[in-house]
Image (tube, rainbow, N blue to C red):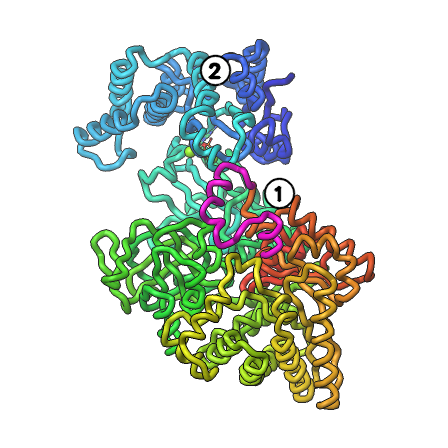
Amino acid sequence: TKWVYSFGAGRNEGRADMRNLLGGKGANLAEMASIGLPVPPGFTITTEVCTYYYANKETYPAELTAEVEAALAHVESSVGLLFGDATKPLLVSVRSGARASMPGMMDTVLNLGLNDITVAGLAKASGDDRFAWDSYRRFIQMFGNVVLEVDHHRFEEIIEHAKLTRGVMEDTDLTAADWQGVVSEYKEMVEEVTGKPFPQDPKEQLWRAIGAVFGSWMNQRAITYRRLHEIPASWGTAVNVQAMVFGNMGLDCATGVCFTRDPSTGENIFYGEYLVNAQGEDVVAGIRTPQPMSKGRAKPGEKPMEEVMPGAYADLVKVRETLEKHYQDMQDIEFTVQQNKLYMLQTRTGKRTAGAALRIAVEMANEGLISREEAINRVPPASLDQLLHPMLDPKAPRTVLSKGLPASPGAACGAVVFSADEAETRAAKGEAVILVRIETSPEDIHGMHAAKGILTTRGGMTSHAAVVARGMGRPCVAGAGGITVDYSAQALSAGGHIVRAGETLTIDGATGEIFVGSVPMIEPKLSGDFATLMEWADQVRRMKVRANAETPLDADTARKFGAEGIGLCRTEHMFFDPARIGAVRQMIMSETEQGRRDALAKLLPFQRDDFAQLFRIMAGLPVTIRLLDPPLHEFLPHTDAEMAEVAQSLNTDLATMKRRGEELAEANPMLGHRGCRLGISYPEIYEMQARAIFEAAVIVAKEAGKAPVPEIMIPLVATTRELEITRAQVEKQAAAVFAETGTTLEYLVGTMIELPRAALNADKIAENADFFSFGTNDLTQTTFGLSRDDAGKFLPEYLEHGIFPKDPFVSIDVEGVGELVKIGSSKGRTVKNGLKLGICGEHGGDPASITFCESVGLDYVSCSPYRVPVARLAAAQAAL
Ligand code: ADP
Ligand code: MG
Ligand code: MG
């Protein structure tokens, strides 16, 4: 095994794609050197040494010493200096570098190789005493802190004391003699704390620093970080040893960090900071104020590098171009200028905001740097979610009240309300409200829908509030434990601040922050780069994307986001309207068919109107309408007053109503009298709904010229006979309406596949179906035998312990539910070639599930309106 890889000075043994062996930093140092960029020479001790170290009682492979000596000798000869030499001392940095950048690892030690003798050599060779002593004190400080674990306050105290006695403010005002004094005090202090003199032997310094890097792989900070980010301990870290270059040698020296494009907006501008006469982490340490890179970004009084060091800046601009061309992505780089000469010390792919990722991808494709396909692949679909909601104006002032989890992106502002009913009432009057609950339950859905935003003080990222809010596209902050809600006092408090019902709050669902009062917002822009990327995505994707929508508002939003039809219109959502619920209850509570028919006659015009509105918005596009699905008891009257009202409409008494209510109660309603079972028991319900659909379709076809394509969907089918019966009901209505109106329209009748039996018998069911839509919410419940509404009690624990790798209601369980989808699809298509297949429910908007749908060959996915762009992009990525 080779344990050490050289880079720079014409010996580049590593490459960017060797990150597993060399770590990210080492691999990219080698890559930069090999494409001719100015990288100080050095070598990387591989991650395999780290693995060996821990597998062999913290010892090194036998060959390591010799390999390090040889690599060091090559560095010495290439820069013409000698490690530990009294007159021409070579100094090095010792830097850790894992595969993935990992906070928690050992900090870099700079200027290693200095001691009481070499410091004099450095002073003489550089002709600069101050520089030499400044470097030495930095070295003792870093080595003392990082390797010897002396608290950094002990060093700072000594510097502060030196500045005080000298009467100066800045480190830069201290002279060579001052630093020399600081060095002696440092050494004394280190000896006092560690019980041993500061190590003077450069070789000992080097091996102890290397040992400290490997040792830090198992420190508590690193272990915790790995656990949180699922990084295996077996990866190990590499160690980079590199010849020093000096940014602290005078006014023609500097050090800086920058991004090749603006990481927050994505703008194609050199973005970063530098400091003259400084070293290493000074830029981020906040000792002095760093200055901007380019003139364009400089505020009055600032000294941009472009002006101060035009030569080095020009070189850096060239490097920037080279790096972007080479890596074909935005880079985050670290550099140092020594006597006007530029050196590159690090490059890596730059982290960026969702907005920046989008802009950079589109612009790089337009610049010809990457292909359009690559641009499509560069943007994480889920990140689009953040861009589709209003954002807080970054320039607006704000007062933070508290913080919770960023459960559903977007910002919202409104009057605080503490109940779902209150939210609905106020929203109906046109008021913007924020629904604040300790936690939410399915009973709060109407209030969540009515609210602009949702805030809970309990629950996590998969709590009811979080999941529902994301589905609805409502901004949500969940689990804000710093806030106490008092329902009876109609007030909340956080850190002594009290907010009463009706007062205004602003929440930011992307950060989890909660603000007092209203903070101005910026509306999302669906044009520009966003539109461009969507257009490219649409060109490559195979699957269509539809929306789950029942209100005209949702349907409009869906169209705006590019939905190509409705994949799921849940008719029962229209039943809760105050103008209709009376008739709905009358229908349910009636004990006779005639009673039900009277009630249904009242509902027909409402339903017809609902469907007509949807058909107008979706003119020419398919609209899948699911006939009544939920257990009837969901609509039951609750209070005596409500009962009495229904009793009156049915000409009966309260006692009869109560008895009927008890009759309708079910032990397990999700598996009870619902779906097509209702249509079979009470054919008049599906008849009315089918009639309303066809009448609406005829009306819209006549006025618009563009006929809608109704796709009537029968829920909860287990056997083909069920579908046969309900299908006949629908067809009878179609024939009747077409005869009455003299208009014939195209339509489809299909079914949801949401029971395992249906999936397993899909070939038989397909004989009566024009399409299948996989209802993966119910299919997940019925496959796992797991109630969605009760899963919250144990699902978090299952996820935490990895018993379920993912929440199966969020991302499709490929092995189980997915297998049923596969079986259903292929069985269906063996009977009917080209049978139309889709998916509706949460999974239709989840990128991983969409990838699965592509692999099965579904024709479309359907998801909530706000997820439509996410699905368009994910479908494109899946197709590439
Ligand atoms: P981190 O991983 O925390 O960014 P680095 O190993 O990149 O740590 O080191 C931090 C900084 O130290 C670098 O950005 C650079 O300014 C400085 N540095 C590291 N090695 C050298 C070197 N050989 N010469 C000059 N400066 C160096
Ligand atoms: Mg650092
Ligand atoms: Mg770095």
> Can residue 537 be seen in the rendering of this structure?
no
Closer mark to the observer between disc 2 and disc 1: 1
Residue at 72 percent across and 51 percent down: it is 822
Mark earlier in primary sequence (2, 1): 2
Taking the image as shown, residue 368 lies to the left or right of residue 412, namely: right
Question: Which residue is at a point 50% across and 35% down the rendered structure image?
Answer: 101
Total marks shown come to 2
Res 11 → quadrant: top right
- Please give left or right for residue 775 compared with residue 788 in the image: right
Q: Amino acid at mark 1?
A: Tyr
Which kind of residue does numbered mark 2 sit on? Phe
Image quarter (top left, top right, bottom left or bottom right) of the N terminus: top right
Q: Which residue is mark 1?
A: 327
> Who is closer to the viewer here, 410 or 677?
677
Element class at badge 2 = strand
Which residues, given as a range, are shown in magenta?
778-804
Q: Secondary structure at mark 1?
A: helix
Q: Position of residue 360 (x, y in %)?
A: 57, 54
Tell me if I can see residue 484 in this picture.
Answer: yes
Give the Cα separation between the discs numbered 2 and 1. Answer: 34 Å
The label shown at residue 83 is: 2
Report the residue at 56% width, 17% height from top: 52
In this view, which residue lies farthest toward the top?
62
